[in-house]
């Protein structure tokens, strides 16, 4: 058991957050820079009556976690880019079968095995579109070790509430750095992180039925007396496959709407110094810390820069960014890739402000000095 | 205190990452804000290794060290690679086996001490060099209380080696005391 106040890696804080959230099953296949999550789960789960299984590969890792969740156990798997690619098929399966599971991706430099020990944010679009077909996505990107603890709890809460896979989109920067944190116990958690458990009371006695005005079914756990089917095919309220286009349409639409209609509950973002800003810097995850330092230094030099950090990268906080874009001259996207979230930002901003990009894909990190230089350069362009 | 930005470098296997973890943890015990990080290649041993700690009274934004105000170089290769990255007033601590150009010694605050030799000859275990370094660094910079350092060292090293490592810690402190002529 870790002390309440401890110096931990982001990966270790993820394990502690998961345990606090109620994780009692972990299955996965270790891969740098996520390995400490598997190691930590192997140590901690037996201490709280949970189970850890190392599977034969990453596909088995997510499949077993989905299976454990089907019988009602809060479950997680963790990986990095190459393994995240392998897990995509089963992320789609959990999405359509509506099975809660937390998938952690500690991003490293890619494609393929890339630079195993180097930071990257090259999976942000894979988190959105990695599995085929239209599907609901929640992906949360923490920016510190303390934030990782809390956001892991939030991932479990959202997975339980919306019965969908939730991605904790970490990166090597946050996963491997150590900071002093407070492991706030369950009973003292702030309101927004209070533990959520799935509602197992079926609607109309049908496992996949939803109450009027709701978007989430209440299937009871397997093995508790209710017989029903689970499949990746479109299916009826008992889970049995169907080719009925009306049923398929209703379910496909509901899967998307359970995110779209609950944005107020799901969306989270952080803002700094945006009130009078002429440049809004958009960032997420480990990049945030360099941006915070750059904003502080720019403000000292009289440059009106501010920060907009989507905490939920998916769903993307479109509405809020639209409002910000109307007030600033430039939106600068800073991310550790060749340009991914910047495309979403361009789509949202739609010309309301000039969208600029600062990226890095050589395995080194973006420094505050580079951000400051870029802000000064784009401020000149905007005049 | 002034924000401390430490960069510890050496060869993989020398324990510079653990040294930064111990310094960060001890400072955290002393209620400081800390961030520790490292970069290394996929090799388990022998590769160039760089680990960093930022210690401050105030919340820390950027998590890496941009320009260190302290550098430790345990090997010639790591000194050669990193000696020009420091601030003008940085303390540069090197093992006495490292060749430091005369000009650099004149323009920088270089602390040259026998870290590796102390570990292998005085303590009797070359693996304790990182703990000798921790003691020396803290003596030179006054980052943490000795109590917090001892607590962190004993919590982070293999069981059964506590006595040896505490000796290593104090031997490191003594090296710096002797070199600055206390």
Image: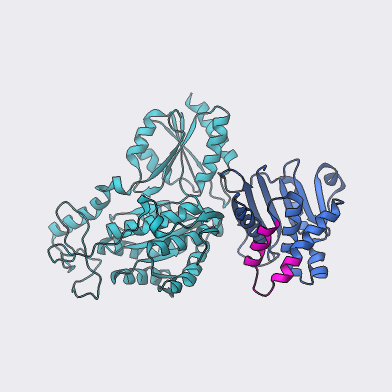
Chain colours: A cyan, B blue
Question: Where's residue A301, x and y in %?
Answer: 58, 29
Q: Is residue A372 left or right of residue A139?
A: right
The quadrant holding residue A115 is bottom right
Residue A110 appears in the picture as rendered: no
- Foreground residue, A83 or A113? A83
Residue A35 inside the magenta-drawn segment: no
Up/down of B25 relative to A359, above or below: below
Residue B157 inside the magenta-drawn segment: yes
Residue at image position (54%, 31%) is A299
Residue at image position (17%, 69%) is A240
Residue at image position (37%, 46%) is A268
Question: Where's residue B96, x and y in %?
Answer: 83, 58
Q: How many marks?
A: 0
Q: Which residues are magenta?
A: B146-167
Question: Where's residue B114, x and y in %?
Answer: 83, 60
- Foreground residue, A106 or A5? A5
């Amino acid at each position: 058991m870790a002390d309440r106040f401890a110096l931990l890696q982001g990966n270790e804080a993820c394990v502690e957050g998961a345990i606090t959230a109620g994780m009692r099953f972990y299955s996965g296949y270790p891969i740098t820079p996520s390995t400490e999550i598997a190691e930590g789960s192997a140590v901690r789960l037996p201490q709280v009556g949970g189970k850890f299984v190392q599977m034969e590969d990453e596909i088995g890792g997510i499949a077993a976690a989905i299976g454990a969740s089907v019988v009602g156990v809060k479950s997680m798997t963790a990986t990095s880019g190459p393994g995240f690619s392998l897990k995509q098929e089963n992320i789609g399966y959990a999405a359509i079968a509506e099975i809660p599971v937390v998938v952690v991706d500690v991003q490293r430099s890619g494609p393929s095995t890339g630079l195993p020990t180097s930071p990257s944010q090259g999976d942000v679009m894979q988190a959105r579109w990695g599995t085929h077909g239209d599907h609901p996505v929640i992906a949360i990107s923490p920016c510190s070790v303390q934030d990782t603890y809390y956001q892991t709890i939030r991932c479990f809460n959202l997975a339980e509430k919306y019965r969908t896979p939730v991605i904790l989109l970490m990166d090597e920067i946050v996963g491997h750095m150590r900071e002093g944190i407070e492991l706030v116990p369950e009973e003292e958690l702030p309101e927004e992180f209070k533990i959520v458990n799935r509602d197992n009371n079926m609607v109309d006695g049908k496992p996949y039925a939803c109450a009027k005005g709701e978007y989430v079914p209440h299937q009871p756990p397997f093995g508790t007396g209710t017989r029903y089917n689970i499949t990746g095919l479109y299916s009826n309220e008992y889970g049995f496959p169907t080719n009925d286009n009306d049923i398929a349409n209703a379910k496909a639409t509901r899967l998307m709407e359970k995110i779209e209609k609950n944005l107020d509950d799901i969306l989270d973002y952080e803002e700094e110094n945006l009130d009078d800003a002429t440049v809004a810097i958009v960032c997420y995850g480990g990049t945030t810390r360099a941006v915070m330092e750059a904003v502080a230094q720019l403000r000292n030099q009289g440059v009106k820069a501010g920060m907009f950090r989507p905490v939920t990268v998916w769903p993307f906080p479109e509405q809020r960014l639209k409002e910000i874009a109307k007030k600033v001259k430039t939106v600068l996207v800073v991310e550790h890739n060749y340009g991914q979230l910047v495309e979403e930002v361009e789509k949202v901003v739609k010309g309301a402000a000039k969208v600029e990009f600062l990226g890095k894909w050589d395995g080194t990190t973006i420094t505050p000095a580079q951000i400051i230089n870029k802000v000064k350069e784009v401020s000149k362009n905007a005049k | 205190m002034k924000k401390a930005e430490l960069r510890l470098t050496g060869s993989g296997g020398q324990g510079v990452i653990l040294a930064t973890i111990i310094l960060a943890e001890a400072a955290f015990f002393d209620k400081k804000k800390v961030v520790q990080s490292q970069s290394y290649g996929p090799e388990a041993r022998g590769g160039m290794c760089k680990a960093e700690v930022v210690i401050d009274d105030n919340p820390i934004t950027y998590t890496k060290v941009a320009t260190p105000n302290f550098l430790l170089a345990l090997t010639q290769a790591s000194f050669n690679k990193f000696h020009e990255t420091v601030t003008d007033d940085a303390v540069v601590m090197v093992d006495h086996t490292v060749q430091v150009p005369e000009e650099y010694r004149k323009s920088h605050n270089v602390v040259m001490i026998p870290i590796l030799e102390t570990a292998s000859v005085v303590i009797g275990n070359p693996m304790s060099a990182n703990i000798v370094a921790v003691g020396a660094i803290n003596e030179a910079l006054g980052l943490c209380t000795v109590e917090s350092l001892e607590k962190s060292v004993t919590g982070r090293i293999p069981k059964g080696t506590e006595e040896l490592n505490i000796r290593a810690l104090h031997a490191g402190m003594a090296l710096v005391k002797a070199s600055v002529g206390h």
